[in-house]
Every structure is written in structure tokens, then in C-alpha cells.
Image (cartoon, rainbow, N blue to C red):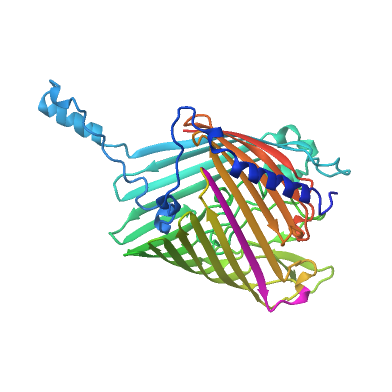
Amino acid sequence: MTSIKKLRWQSYFLAVFLMAGLVFLPFNLWADTAGKPAATTSDEDVLAGFEDEKSADDDALSGFDDAPTDDDALSGFEDTPADDKTKASQTKKSPSIWHFSGHLKLAGAYSFSHSAPAANQSDWRGLSRQRTELQLALRIKPSERWQVYGAVNGFKDWVYTTRKEDFNPNVVSAYEEEIEIRELYFQGRLSDRFDVKLGRQIMVWGKSDNVRVTDVLNPLDLREPGLTDIADLRLPVAMSRLDFYVGAFSVTGIAIHEIRFHKIPIFGSDFYPGDVPPPTQEKPAGNFEDTQFGLALNGVFSGWDASFYLADVYDHNTYVKRIGTSLPPVLKRQHARLKMVGAAANLAYGNWLVKTEAACLSGFRSFNRSGQEYARLDALLGFEYAGFKNTTLSIEAVNRIIIDYDAALIQAPDFIEAGEFQSVLRLSRDFLNETLNLTLLLSSWGITGQDGSFERLGAEYDLNDAIKLIGGVVLYQSGNLARFQNIGDNDRVYFEVKYSF
């Protein structure tokens, strides 16, 4: 078993070294071979992403702006009859209402820090992912105001086929293959002020790129933490969304009809924190009274924007509840119903972007305070700096504090701390005329990372417009938090080839 401090300080020294190298690398070392000047950062670039929720989350008009192609400069010299030219022009200017797209992905990972497993335990040494993934998407846009979009995603991980005897049968069953409807929605504009979007979709709340505070609507895929960003981890849910626009403001009302929670590491996974399986999970029935709700008010102004949120949703995490009084006790994992009041804001000043979020969530439940509810206050502050050439540096930190904390919450099976501090540092830089991107991500829990941490150094290279090569290394350190106590041996390199069409 790797100790809590395994590789922590070595990783920090490596991170500092890489940061210094990326930021202060001579600017002309990676200059465009064609002699083209590298892109510079302007105030307009800093404000990029400050659009309202409408544009950030698949604006109702997104994809609706296909424009006719310009007339040929030599059109006046053709001998085609006028009627034929008109028909040809109409044919040329009418875009197809169908748009088919998707991607094919080949992904792998190699775990290099695991020791030999004990008898009857999974062997995670060596090749731990050998996945083929296919996503197919179809957009139908019959008019400028309406569209239908659907995407289906599926994968097959051949590691669990070729090495089936090395893994827990539960792991093989859950991780070997999967297929799901990624998104399926109907979207349109009812009037100049009202948009509607119905179906399975993703709705992003908040301003942070790395940490969730007010972003409570969509669950996440947490089965292999650290390998990718939150933007690629959100799971869609079926919801109805209505947007109203007036001036610089928009109001969004949401009703969530699908009951869906985080995908977490299952028993036997190298990211599962314990040696015994968890209690059975109970989910809400999905009746009409289980519908979840959200309301957002957004304002976008010159140099800053702000949002206010209300939500009545289920906790994506579970708590353990004792059922009845029998011995031995019958335990179930259930989901509490939470109320959230939150706010978020961005402020741009020169090359700086300041992010802040805060939320008060009430309705949490626990095993050791059975029958009682408790509340939590989350506050985030972040900074992003884009003053270096082709480089972005961001730092985000969030503190989560339990209100009226009871010392009983730290006991099993709750393991709830009075407070939880998380910080994320991201350094990203483009090279080779923006075809190569290197990103260093440091994520830690606790002031010094004592509660758990990981570091990821990744690279993405655009081989051409359709093919992208991705690879990197992730280092994990175990920590005091229950979910991080046994992750220190999970260090791995990963690689991926993605073909988009």
C-alpha cells in the first residue's frame, strides 16, 4: 500500500519545474515555421466566454446561421438561360436540413505503480484500458428557428475481454462495454424573447472550469477521476427548459424529469475506497413528485456578468440509512433532497479574469445524525491570467463548510469532515501555431494536499482537421478523505487517437 505522502513532494517539484518551463520558455523557440506572428491576447479575447447561458449551453440559434455562399464572380459571363440560373442559384443557396457528425476514438491507459495483488483481488498492473468508442450524431434543422439533435455513444473496452480473469466480475460487467443516448432534444424559438429546449441535455451553471459549486443539475462520470476535465464528465438528463430574454438579462426555468446520479467507482475498481461492497442503493421512483427544478437569472454587461440560482434537486451522492431495527442492521444508500441558493460572477480586467461562486445547500442527511438535516456553505474564488504569449494560467479554490457541525459526522460510515478545502491550478500553452497544446493540472484537497491530490500533464496535437492525438500522465497521492485513501497506486499514462467526422 502506498503511503499518504507517496510522491507528493516529488510531484510538486516536478509541477513547479514544468510550470516555469512552459511560462518562461523563449517565445521564439516555438515560432511558426512560416514566419506568421503568433496570436496575441486582446481585451475581446479575455471577454470570450462571457456570453449568457443561452450561448454557452447550445444557444437556440446555434447551428441556425448557415448562410448562402457568395455568388460566383464570373456568374455574369455564363450562357445559362435565366430560368436555369435561378434554379441553380436556389439549389446552391439551400443548405441541407440534415447534418451528420460523430467521432471514432481509440483510447488506452497503462498503470505503472501497482504492486502485485493479493489473492482473489483484481490485477490492475499494466494495460488497464484498451477502448474503442464510437459516437454518432444527427442534427435536423428544418427552419431557422427549430432543430432536433440526437447523439448516441458506445464503447467496448477490450482489456476486460482479453484479461477478464484478472478482474472482479462486477468490474468486468460494469466497465467492459456501454451504450447510451448521449443527447436527444428538440429546440426552438417561440418568439423573439422565448426559447424552448426539451429532451436529454446538459445545462451548465456557474463560472468555474474545474470545480463544481452551483453546477448541480447534471451528474458526473467519476469512475476514473483525473483523466479528463469536468466538461467531458457531465452526464445528460431529460429536462424541459424555457428561456426568456429582455435586454441584458435572461431568465431560465428548468424541470428535470430523469432521475440520474453520479457514476462512481464500483466495488473491485482500483478507485473504490474500501475492501467490502457498499450497501444497496435505493433510487427515487421517478414519479411526478420526484421532478427536480431549477431557476436562473443571468445578466451580461460590459466587462462582467453575474448569475443567481435556485434549485430543488436530489443529492448526486448518497448517505447510508438504517432500515428497521433488525440485527444485524439492514443498510441502504439513499439520496437526500437538497435546496440550493447560489450566485456566480465573472469580472474581466485587462488580462485578468476573476471568477467567484457561492452556494448554500440544505437538506443533507447522514447515518450518525439520523432523522436530522444539515446544511453546507460553499464558496469559490478563482483567477485566470492570459498575459503570457499563447499561455493561460488559472487558479481556483473552494472551501466547503458544514453549518452547525456535529462531531458524530466524522464517524463511519459517514466520514464527513467539518470543512473541505480544494484547490486547482491549471497551466495551458499552445505551440506550433496552435496545433499542439500542453496542459498541467494540479488538483489537491487540503491546504497542503494532505486529504488527497493528483497531477496531470497532458498534450493534445491536431494532426489535421479530423485527427487529434492525445496523451499524458496522471500521478495520484492518497489522502485523509475516505474516497482518496487508496488511490496512491493508480498512477498511469494514457493515450488516445480521435477521428472526428
Q: Position of residue 28 (x, y in %)?
A: 53, 35
Residue located 15% across and 22% down the image: 78
- Is 36 placed above or below 483 here? above
- Is 499 placed above or below 321 here? above
Residue located 66% across and 51% down the image: 442
Residue 65 appears anywhere in the view:
yes
Residue located 45% across and 29% down the image: 35
Question: Which residues, given as a range, are shown in magenta?
Answer: 390-408
Majority secondary structure in the magenta region: strand
Question: On the picture, is 473 further left or further right than 463?
Answer: right
Task: In the displayed orientation, state which residue is furthest to the top.
Answer: 79
Say if the magenta span includes residue 86. Answer: no
Q: Position of residue 132 (x, y in %)?
A: 61, 34
Q: Position of residue 341 (x, y in %)?
A: 53, 72
Q: Nearer the viewer, residue 488 or 326?
A: 488
Say if the magenta span includes residue 403. Answer: yes
